[in-house]
Amino acid sequence: MLVAVTATVRVVDGVDRVRLNAAYVRALEGAGLVPLIVPPLADTDAAVRILDAVSGLVLSGGEDVDPSLYGDTPHPALGAVNCSRDVTELALLAAARERNLPTLAICRGIQVVNVGLGGTLVQDLPSQQSDVAEHELDGQRATRVHGVSVEPSSRLARILGSESLDVNSIHHQAVDRLGDAMRVSARADDGVIEGVESDDPDWWMVGVQWHPEELTATPEPWDRRLFDAFADACRAGVSSASTSLPSALGASASPASGGLEKEAHR
């Protein structure tokens, strides 16, 4: 089952190269999914058409989001931004929401979702919020460095099977004012928002600020459960679309043409 996974473009050895950490690929394959890498594209319509071929969307980690997108001016500690990536991912997000396409948002991804739904970001936690722990620990990608409390009634709590867990931390920005039609599902011990999810029961959208793809090989099951739940949501969406075909297409629908028909309704 194909899922779209966003990537970035970076200059490496003087050449623009599409980049995505292999941990995403391993985590998705471990959940029975096949990632289709989507880099920033000049044609956002083309990017959106990619969703016709997939059963879910993963918004991956990476650069800071351009603060002009949420009406703010750049902070001195703002990191690199990629405007082409911002535009591509916001278009994918809008289309996924319209289609109720299962969406898993990770690190930068949770920030893109929040901005895309009308929210704002803390541009730099260390300088803009007091009494917060160190959250940018890139050298400890596979280490659980701080605790997270999960809202008991949230979808995330049901997925993880726990209301508390320890996670890694590789970010200096965070969700500030929450976007529309979302709820906070998890916070770090210092209050930083670590999880959000859609209020719409028809749209499976879960966002986490940590990097679960880096933790699926650890003994704890939480992060594997997150990818498994995303995979289950993707399969459920395909099953639901298939079930609706006869009534949607009329008596002419036939098993031989079912594969193409599913794509049309996804």
Image (cartoon, rainbow, N blue to C red):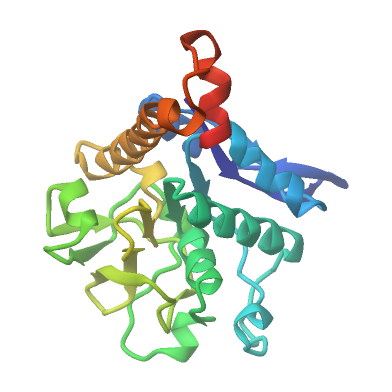
Identify the residue at the far top of this view.
Answer: 256
Q: Is residue 90 left or right of residue 246?
A: right
- Res. 32 visible in picture: yes
Q: Where is residue 141 shown, x and y percent of the image?
A: 42, 50
| Vertical position of residue 175 compared to residue 110: above or below | below
Determine if residue 22 is in view: no
| Residue nearest the viewer, comparing 52 with 124 | 52
Residue 9 on image: x %, y %: 74, 50
Judge from the rendering whether residue 96 lies leftward or rightward of residue 167; answer left or right. right
Which residue is pictured at 46% across the width and 59% down the height?
107
Horizontal and vertical percent for residue 137? 43, 62
In this view, 68 is above or below 232: below
- Across and down, in percent, residue 170 comes to 45, 61
**Residue with the most extreme front position:** 251
Write the residue at 26% across / 79% down. Answer: 190
Residue at position x 61%, y 36% in the image: 52
Of 219 and 7, nearer the camera is 7
Q: At 33% from the left edge and 67% from the top edge, which residue is drawn?
A: 194
Closer to the camera in the image, 99 or 230? 99
Residue 161 position (above or below residue 68): above
Left or right of 21? Residue 175 is: left
**Number of residue marks:** 0
